[in-house]
Image (tube, rainbow, N blue to C red):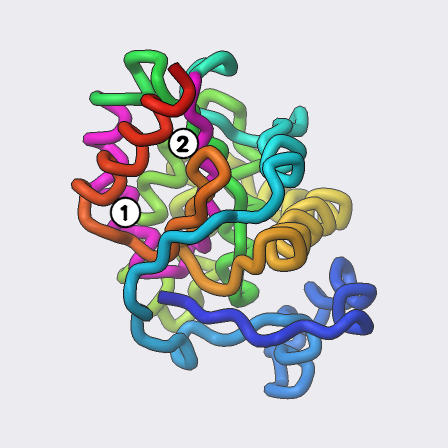
Amino acid sequence: MHKMMVIGAAAVAGLGAVAYSQFEAGGAPDAVAAAGVIRPAEAAASPPMRVEPAGPAAFFQLAAEVAADEKVLGQPDAPVTIIEYSSLTCPHCAAFHEETLPVLKDTYIETGKVRLIIRDFPFDRFGLQAAMTAHCLPENQYFGFVDLLFEKQSVWSRASDPLAAIQQIARFAGMTEQAFQDCLNDEALMDRILQRRQDGAKQFEIGSTPTFLINGKKLVGNQPLDTFKDMIEAALAESS
């Protein structure tokens, strides 16, 4: 599981174009730390499962409001909302998307019981660039592209040139080289992704990926399927 370093108030103000330029420059250790980002190689092992309140209910209700550019699976009136904070370079996130999410889709999302809000929480520049690329594709290609990035994560994230590998996958999705470069130069998109990451860290103490907010309760880590089912069933019972 990816673990996040402590971010001070000064670092919060420095996110955005400055943080991305540090990623592009290769991310010297002090610069990466100042941007609130660690490299995948520095990620710690998964901590024990934790289930805890995500904070005041009002905070969760506010967090569950979906911005126009956010990606959501499920119906807006579903009784249970899950917010997933994940990074495209996080192996535990890939495992969740490959093993657990398909079952949750069939059982809860496609039956109208759950909606899933995806929030990017990148820990390194390639995770950020991959997330930006996904957001630049047409709406109907987003989830398929994300699924492919998670499926092939061990290949592109470990390539000698991960950015070139991301571009190759994007090319298969129909993105031209110019569109790819324009996407990575979109500072407004980058700022939105980094701001949401910072909001999650600040409001709900998100410090590792994947982390889930399930109707106001925080579940840390890619836990067994039965754990997700138990929490969803409890949330459904509370909402009925």
Real-space CA distance between mark 1 and mark 2, rounded to the nearest whole angstrom: 14 Å
Q: Quadrant of residue 67?
A: top right
- Name the residue: 82% across, 64% down: 13
Residue depicted at x 30% and y 37%? 231
User: Magenta span has 92?
Assistant: yes
Q: Residue at x 29, y 67 (%)?
A: 48
Residue range highlighted in magenta: 79-106
Q: Where does residue 199 sit, x and y in percent of width and height?
A: 67, 51
The residue that disc 1 covers is 96
Give 124 or 222, whichever is nearer the viewer.
Answer: 222
The amino acid sitting under disc 1 is Phe
Does residue 92 appear in this view?
Answer: yes
Identify the mark nearer the N-term, 1 or 2: 1
- Answer few, some or many: residues within 10 Å of disc 1's Cα (few below 14, many 20 plus, some between 14 and 19): some
Residue at which label 2 appears: 143
Residue at the image point whose x is 46% and y is 33% from the top: 215
Q: Secondary structure at mark 2?
A: helix
For the residue pair 6 and 234, the one nearer the viewer reads as 234
Lateral position of residue 125 relative to residue 12, left or right: left
25 left or right of 76 in image: right
